[in-house]
Amino acid sequence: MRLLLITTFLAFSVGTAQAQKSSGSGMLSSIRNGIASFYHDKFEGRKTATGEIFDNDKFTAASNKLKLGSYVKVTNLNNRQVIYVRINDRMAKSNNRLIDLASIAAKKLHFHKNGIAKVKVEPVSEEEGRKAILAQNSFNLLPGNKL
């Protein structure tokens, strides 16, 4: 009986570790809470750390703690609004905030007027991130859905 329990436990542990390894490749490994801010307009048109041209109307963000190219789900902890962004830039080394969002994302999270917000940042797969950002962009194109 004991051998059966040990064997079952080991089989489950190995299977779980392999599933986490395969599903987590290229993703952040933990959920983080912190402070979000948003880009100043002066950065519009400048190159980001990935070489892209920054556009405040795209769902992108900067972070010193999150992997470049990764996709994350950002939840405003005050109102539970959610958006998805791709990390494509770095912040100044002296900036200790978790994430700096493009203006469109700050507006969707309803903290653009306040300047900062407490947020939860969760890693998501590239597939989930791309689909969510596409849906967010499509929603913005519908009549009556302007920010």
Image (cartoon, helix red, strand yellow):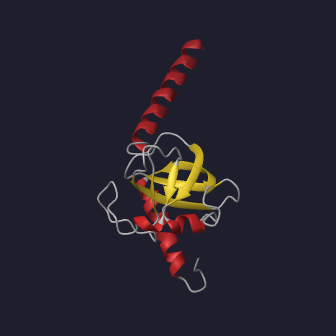
Looking at the picture, how far across and down is residue 13, in whole percent?
A: 50, 27
Looking at the picture, how far across and down is residue 43, in whole percent?
A: 41, 64
Residue at (52% x, 40% y) in the render: 30
Q: Nearer the viewer, residue 135 or 78?
A: 78
| Image quadrant assignment for residue 24 | top left
Report the side of 28 relative to 34 (left or right).
Answer: left
Residue sitting farthest toward the bottom: 143
Looking at the picture, how far across and down is residue 32, in whole percent?
A: 56, 43
Count up the numbered dots: 0
| Image quadrant assignment for residue 143 | bottom right
Task: Specify the quadrant that holds the N terminus.
Answer: top right
Looking at the picture, how far across and down is residue 95, in whole percent?
A: 49, 46
Q: From what the image shows, is residue 138 above or below residue 37?
A: below
Report the side of 110 relative to 21 (left or right).
Answer: right
Q: From what the image shows, is residue 50 above or below residue 46?
A: above
Q: From what the image shows, is residue 106 above or below residue 77?
A: below
| Image quadrant assignment for residue 145 | bottom right
Residue sitting farthest toward the top: 2
Q: Nearer the viewer, residue 97 or 88?
A: 97
Residue at (33% x, 54% y) in the render: 49
Q: From what the image shows, is residue 9 above or below residue 110?
A: above
Task: Specify the quadrant that holds the C terminus.
Answer: bottom right
Residue sitting farthest toward the right: 78
